[in-house]
Image: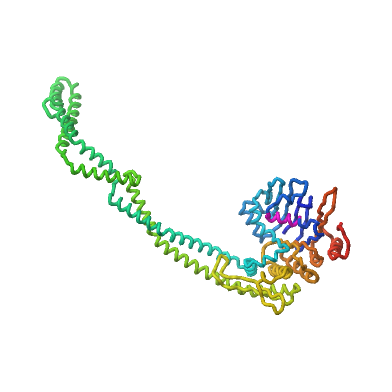
């Protein structure tokens, strides 16, 4: 509930701290006294965008601050915690600052917040019912919402809403896959051609290097033969080559070591060197025997290297990257060919989701039909008590294709007078009738919604006499489950309030000021007299 409202420099109000109480609060005063400034301040608290034109003339800044209390059943603390705003003492303070230079600020519990955050929590704080609020009833969506609030099974509606949006996502995915089908088939053909080419070539890792070495050997075979023969000849192919000379030196060392052991080590080293050179000579001899002129193999290697180079250029890959690329293509092909299975699986999911939604919608339809009969009877009784004794309200629920809110078309009908056909609200109701019908609905729905504060701005417009008294009684009934703030010009309505605020204006130093005063019992009697026109009272002091 709203405990206190502080207003500074808004329209005619220079500075005012306004207390509110639980139950039925009424605001009264002459037209132009400043009631609109209070309503404007409350609108700012509930997230309306600020306009610098509301700043009192001569001021550079306006502000409004509201203190709300909430009980343990309120969802407000959870919502604030989700926003990262502290809220642990059963109170929330909202402050708006409007600057003439256009820079405005919003605070929730003294923490700077975006206006969007305030708008998101406003429905947990208050509902503003203006003079023309009844026109909301012309909206079929509002009529459906009233019925759903009455039966209160919002969990079922949320399940339908979630399922519907999930179904739309599945259908959108399916449509996208179908639209991309021709591109997918072209991609499969392209992958298969590349795979076939790469698999047929079957390039092994390191193959290009091995082939290039063999190719180099075959191309330079004559040079290799000549030079290896020269080396062989120099090492051991003649009497003057290295091997015979080393053998003779070894014999000499054998003779010397018998004369001096010093030569033993030299003999051993020379024997080792001779064995190494003999091994080299033997290897060269074998290598020369294996050398053959093979032009056919040279052509094979050349063709293979040409194929590998062509693949490298085509795919922009190193030869050692062709195999991994081939494996990647195979994986892509497998995934693309899985799409057919995925499409079938998606169709099954869509069918299952549609079936689930239909079952939920049937359950909701049955609930709405049952609730509609109860609600239309309750609204009819309330409307008839508002001096429309013969009026009849009916609610029609027609099943259609399901949507995010179920599969029902909900519409309210009114027969305002005997002998008239029932017609949709938007076609038949006058301003007075729709105001009374709207109030009747609010009475029926009292306690069905969690909004703690309901603000009625001249809901009694175009109504008077005994009907106004009944409206006051209805508001008092609503005040049993909600805090009510009502702006009225009718004493018949104001007399039922348990907390009465009077708004007046006065001129001071050439400026007009709005004054807000809490009335005691005597002050209320005087105000009722003014409202009825039975006394001439400029201000209530």
Residue 294: image quadrant is top left
Q: Quadrant of residue 382?
A: bottom right
Q: Does the image show residue 509?
A: yes
The answer to whether residue 286 is left or right of residue 378 is left
Q: Residue at x 30, y 53 (%)?
A: 196
In the rendered image, residue 483 lying in the magenta stretch gets the answer no
Q: Nearer the viewer, residue 183 or 244?
A: 183
- At horizontal 24% and vertical 43% (from top left) the residue drawn is 302
Relative to 157, say whether 86 is above or below.
above
In the picture, measured across the screen, residue 296 lies left or right of residue 197, that is left
Q: Residue furthest front?
A: 427
- Residue extending furthest left? 239
Magenta span: predominant SS is: helix
Q: Which residues are magenta?
A: 37-48
Residue at image coords 29%, 46%: 204
**Image spot of residue 297 (x, y percent):** 19, 43
Q: In the rendered picture of this protein, how many numbered marks are placed on residues? A: 0
Q: Position of residue 541 (x, y in %)?
A: 87, 56
Residue 425 spot, x, y in % from top left: 67, 71
Q: Is residue 520 left or right of residue 137?
A: right
Outermost residue toward the bottom in this view: 419
- Asked whether the viewer can see residue 483, the reply is no
The answer to which of 153 and 380 lies nearer the viewer is: 380
Q: Is residue 393 left or right of residue 209?
A: right
Residue 244, position in %: x, y?
13, 26
């Amino acid at each position: 509930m709203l405990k206190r409202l502080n207003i500074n420099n808004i329209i005619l109000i220079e500075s005012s701290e306004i207390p509110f109480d639980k139950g039925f609060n009424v605001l009264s005063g002459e037209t132009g006294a400043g009631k609109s400034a209070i309503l404007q301040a409350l609108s700012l608290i509930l997230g309306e965008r600020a306009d610098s034109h509301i700043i009192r003339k001569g001021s550079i800044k306006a502000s409004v601050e509201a203190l709300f209390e909430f009980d343990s059943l309120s969802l407000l603390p959870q919502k604030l915690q989700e926003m990262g705003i502290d809220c642990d003492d059963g109170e929330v303070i909202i402050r708006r600052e409007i600057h003439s230079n256009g820079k405005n600020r919003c605070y929730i519990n003294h923490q700077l917040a975006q206006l969007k955050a305030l708008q998101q929590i406003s429905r947990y704080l208050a509902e503003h019912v203006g003079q023309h609020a009844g026109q909301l009833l012309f909206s079929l969506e509002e009529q459906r919402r009233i019925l759903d609030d009455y039966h209160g099974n919002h969990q079922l509606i949320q399940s339908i809403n979630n399922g519907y949006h999930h179904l739309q996502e599945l259908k959108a995915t399916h449509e996208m896959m179908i639209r991309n089908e021709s591109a997918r088939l072209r991609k499969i053909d392209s992958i298969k051609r590349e795979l076939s080419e790469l698999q047929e070539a079957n390039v092994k890792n390191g193959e290009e290097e091995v082939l290039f070495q063999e190719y180099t050997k075959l191309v330079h075979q004559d040079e290799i033969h000549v030079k290896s023969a020269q080396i062989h000849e120099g090492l051991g192919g003649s009497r003057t080559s290295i091997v015979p000379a080393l053998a003779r030196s070894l014999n000499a060392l054998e003779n010397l070591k018998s004369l001096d052991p010093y030569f033993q080590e030299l003999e051993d080293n020379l024997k080792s060197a001779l064995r190494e050179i003999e091994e080299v000579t033997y290897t060269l001899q074998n290598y020369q025997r294996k050398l053959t002129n093979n032009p056919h193999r040279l052509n094979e290697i050349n063709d293979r290297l040409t194929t590998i180079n062509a693949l490298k250029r085509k795919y922009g890959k190193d030869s050692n990257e062709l195999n991994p690329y081939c494996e990647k293509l195979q994986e892509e092909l497998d995934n693309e060919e899985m799409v057919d299975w995925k499409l079938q699986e998606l169709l099954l999911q869509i069918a299952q989701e549609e079936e689930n939604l239909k079952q939920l919608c049937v359950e909701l339809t049955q609930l709405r039909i049952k609730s509609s009969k109860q609600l239309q009877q309750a609204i009819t009784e309330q409307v008839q008590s508002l001096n429309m004794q013969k009026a009849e309200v009916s609610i029609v629920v027609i099943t259609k294709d399901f949507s995010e809110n179920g599969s029902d078309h909900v519409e309210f009908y009114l027969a305002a007078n005997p002998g008239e056909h029932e017609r949709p609200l938007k076609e038949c109701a006058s301003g007075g009738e729709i105001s009374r019908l709207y109030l009747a609905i609010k009475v029926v729905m009292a306690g069905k919604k969690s909004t703690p504060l309901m603000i009625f701005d001249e809901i009694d417009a175009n109504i008077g006499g005994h009907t106004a008294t009944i409206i006051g009684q209805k508001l008092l009934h609503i005040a049993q489950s909600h805090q009510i703030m009502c702006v009225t010009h009718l004493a018949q309505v104001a007399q039922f309030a348990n907390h009465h605020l009077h708004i007046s204006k006065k001129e001071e130093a050439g400026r007009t000021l709005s004054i807000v005063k809490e009335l005691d019992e005597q002050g209320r009697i005087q105000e009722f007299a003014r409202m009825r026109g039975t006394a001439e009272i400029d201000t209530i002091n």
